[in-house]
Amino acid sequence: MLFLVLLLAALGGVAVAVFLTVRGLRAVVRRSERSRPGSWLRAVTLLAGAGAVAIYAWGLLHVGFAVMQAEDGGAGSFPIEPCREAGPQVASRVDGYAVSYLPLRFECRLSDGGTYLTSSVPGYVNPVVAALGLITATSGILGSTVARRAQTPVA
């Protein structure tokens, strides 16, 4: 069930990323959009936001694949496949898994109460999402400030 939720969230993320990309490119191309103050900052905000959403959706697909492997019952299903990378001694103590969404990761739970991370999510996903999120927030704030200043009349 969790796999389906992650898959639907990833597909929704792709749809949002496409929408933001189209809006950002439209802000760059249209002459009427370019004449507004702060239009380049608006385009940067939309395109960086699209990139952040797309990379996060990519990470969700990786987590979803790890969850699918973990929930797969049958021959060879113990220890949980994504948790086998730590070696047979550690993997034999695995009694479950957890998914974290911020930062995006797949963790294996040990019977003694500890946890360890797997490499299910590529190492670049969380830093790139954080950097693009910061760029999105900064350019969005600057763009709205520039647009607001342009609207206020000078006395």
Image (tube, rainbow, N blue to C red):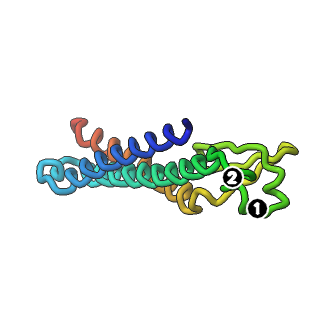
The percent position of residue 146, horizontal first and vertical second, equals 31, 46
Does residue 78 appear left or right of residue 120 in this picture? right
Q: Are marks 2 and 1 in contact (CB under 8 Å)?
A: no
The percent position of residue 7, horizontal first and vertical second, equals 46, 44
The percent position of residue 116, horizontal first and vertical second, equals 75, 53
Say the numbered circle drawn on residue 127. Answer: none
Where does the N terminus fall, quadrant-wise?
top right
Residue 28 figure quarter? bottom left
> Reading the chain from its start, which is encountered first: label 2 or label 1?
2
Q: Which residue is more in the foreground, 22 or 36?
A: 22
Say the numbered circle drawn on residue 75. Answer: 2
Q: Which residue is more in the foreground, 85 or 81?
A: 81
| Residue picked out by circle 1 | 86
What is the distance, in whole Å, between disc 2 and disc 1 at their CAs? 20 Å
The percent position of residue 96, horizontal first and vertical second, equals 74, 43
Does residue 150 appear left or right of residue 73 in this picture? left
Residue 155 in view, yes or no: no
